[in-house]
Structures are given as structure tokens and as C-alpha cells.
Amino acid sequence: MESPRNLRYTNTHEWVKGTKELKVGITEFAQEQLGELTFVELPAVGDSFAAQEEVGVVESVKAA
């Protein structure tokens, strides 16, 4: 599995792209481990966050 170089990764399989306006996601490995998602909570566009702050919730059938 190749990792794009323009993304920054966490130890818990999330990624961030950008410097001021960010896009976030989860790795292919995390997607495979989670399986079917049952709930996703995301912030509103334009919200601001501090470093290390939790900004969303993802729940799945496998993780429940």
C-alpha cells in the first residue's frame, strides 16, 4: 500500500492534507478495519481547531 507524500499521517491511521485549509481522512487500512460505517459526525466548514483536538466521530459495524 503506497502512501501519498503530500499527506501527513497519524499513528492511528488518519491523514491531513494542506497547511491552512485542511482536508482530513482515514487510511485505506483503517477503512478496511472499520468496514461499513454506521455513523459519521464532522465539523462545519470554517470551524477552527487546536492541535491534537478531536474534530469528528466515525462509528462502524466492526468497531461497535
Image (cartoon, rainbow, N blue to C red):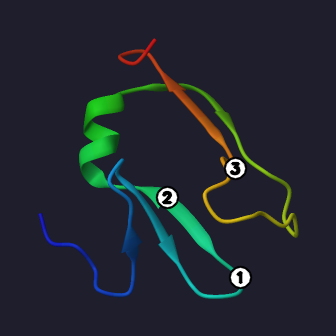
Compared to residue 48, the image places residue 62 above or below, namely above
Left/right of residue 64 with respect to residue 24 in the rendered view: left
Left/right of residue 25 with respect to residue 7 in the rendered view: right
Residue topped by disc 2: 25
For the residue labelled by badge 2, is the local secondary structure a helix, a strand or a loop? strand
| Residue type at the position of mark 3 | Val
C-alpha distance separating marks 1 and 3: 14 Å
Residue topped by disc 1: 21
| Residue type at the position of mark 2 | Gly
| Residue type at the position of mark 1 | Glu
Q: Around disc 2, counting alpha carbons within 10 Å, would you say few (fewer than 14), some (14 to 19), or many (20 or more)?
A: some
Q: Do the residues labelled 3 and 2 touch (CB within 8 Å)?
A: no
The residue that appears at 32% across and 43% down in the rendered structure is 30
Residue topped by disc 3: 55
Residue nearer the viewer, 52 or 12: 52
Identify the mark nearer the N-term, 1 or 3. 1
Horizontal and vertical percent position of residue 32: 26, 38
Identify the mark nearer the N-term, 3 or 2. 2
Residue nearer the viewer, 27 or 51: 51
The residue that appears at 67% across and 44% down in the rendered structure is 56
Place residue 35 in its image quadrant. top left
